[in-house]
Image (cartoon, helix red, strand yellow):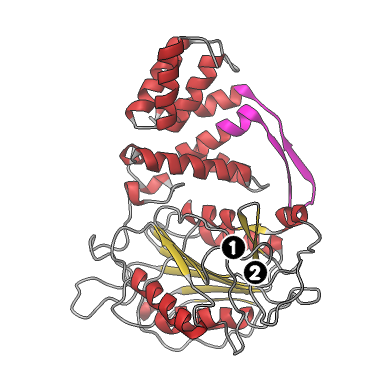
Amino acid sequence: MRLAFVALCWLSALLAPPLLAQTSESRPPETQRNQTRKFALVIGNGQYAGANRALKNPTQDARLMSETLLKLGFEVQTHLNLSRADMSQRVSAFAAALPAGATSLVFYAGHGLQINGASYLMPVDIQLSSEQNVQLRAYPLRRLLDEVSSAASAVNIVILDACRDNPFQPPPPVRYRSNGPMGLARVLAPRGTLLAYSTQPGQLAADGVGANSTYTATLAKTLLDPGLTLEDIFKKVNTLVRNATRDDQIPWFETSLTDAYFLIPPEGTRITAGQSLRSGVGSSVQGPQRAAFPAEATLPTLWFLGMQAHELGKLQAHMDQLIDDLGATDMPKWQQQAEGGNVVAMTLLGRLHLHGAAPWRDAASDASVPLVSDKSKALHWFQKAADQGFPIAQFELATMYRAGDGVNPDQAKARELLQKASKARYRRAEMELLELNIFGAAPR
């Protein structure tokens, strides 16, 4: 429920000007900025068509969060009542513009739902008729997480006040922020990311009887408390919301951040807002602490060699999900990243060209876009990533050589690649090598 990721850093600031337009972009005065730049994307979707679907608070929640983040020195983009095409474009543009080492924050208020374990954020133009319709027309949370986790930012925070009412069921007496089977599904936070939900996975969160939802109102106040780490902030929010709702709503957050990260540092601490207490520099998370799909230009060349076996397994699962959620904008993005040296993008392209892909729906043209198998292109991209020592690509290339899939069978080459991937503690390669040693050279 992505799994991409948004950052908070702090400085005291002047009160933000009123947000009058449906879409706005605001920057803090130059005197409020510090060495670590902070960017926020705030989306509030409430004007849904159809009975029992409109929500009164998301646009107000978006305004409140924008005002709060401006006080904290963020450069804020605020967008209200977006279509699916607009959501996709705004998120992609925001992530692409994040500079190296920055902190980023994405806040979404509106309808959300899960289908078959995958979570979706609901654009205001969606027409709900079936689960298949939702999967084609809604905006996948995984895509949001992928966008921010592949950016050059160092720390990302994604906040979802998005567990509201189910349009396929009779309306409950209290308006909730969820569509589908009981709230959003759990999604592991990508590396370098804190992912916060207004309620625990699979449960519902009240839209609120006041001007704002209970969660957003509590979060906006707590973000301004000085001397708290990110984890302390969301733990405090969780406690306050549980108390206010008598445990009817229990917020949740996941984090892969390893350092104590401050928005407003405590007095006497020799770091500036947006810095890690351990590193002492502006959130410069690198190597194994980066997101699962990193911008490698900012990392050591062999960043993945520092990963443990379970981390490589999570990265593989993350890549599998990227393939499953393939959209019309992904191929051009991965092509550009692969040409820039990103081994994850190279491996994703190799898999797509090896197996082909089911047609996906182009949001702009509403046309079906197929991808046929091309083994020569698959070999090209797997080889490039394998040559850089990426164990997942080495494993994929080994399976091609072992089975003679698009290449002449070469068991010696397959064994060599599997041995390299096994030394990097990639468990799938270890199992494949064990099978090869037991059963010999016969392909699977």
Q: Is residue 57 magenta?
A: no
Assess whether mark 2 and mark 1 are in contact (beta carbons under 8 angstroms): yes
Q: Is residue 202 above or below residue 304?
A: below
Q: Is residue 86 above or below residue 369?
A: below
> Which label sits on residue 178?
2
Distance of mark 1 from mark 2, alpha carbons?
Answer: 7 Å
> Of 8 and 12, which appears nearest the observer?
8
Report x, y in % for residue 14: 42, 88
Report x, y in % for residue 364: 75, 54
Question: In the figure, is residue 171 to the left or right of 41?
Answer: right
The residue that label 1 is drawn on is: 184
Q: Is residue 414 visible?
A: yes
Magenta segment range? 350-375
Where disc 2 sits, the SS reads loop
Question: In the figure, is residue 417 to the left or right of 246?
Answer: left
Report x, y in % for residue 262: 31, 71
Question: What count of labels does the image hold?
Answer: 2
Type of amino acid under label 2 = Ser
Where disc 1 sits, the SS reads loop
> Of 5 and 187, which appears nearest the observer?
187
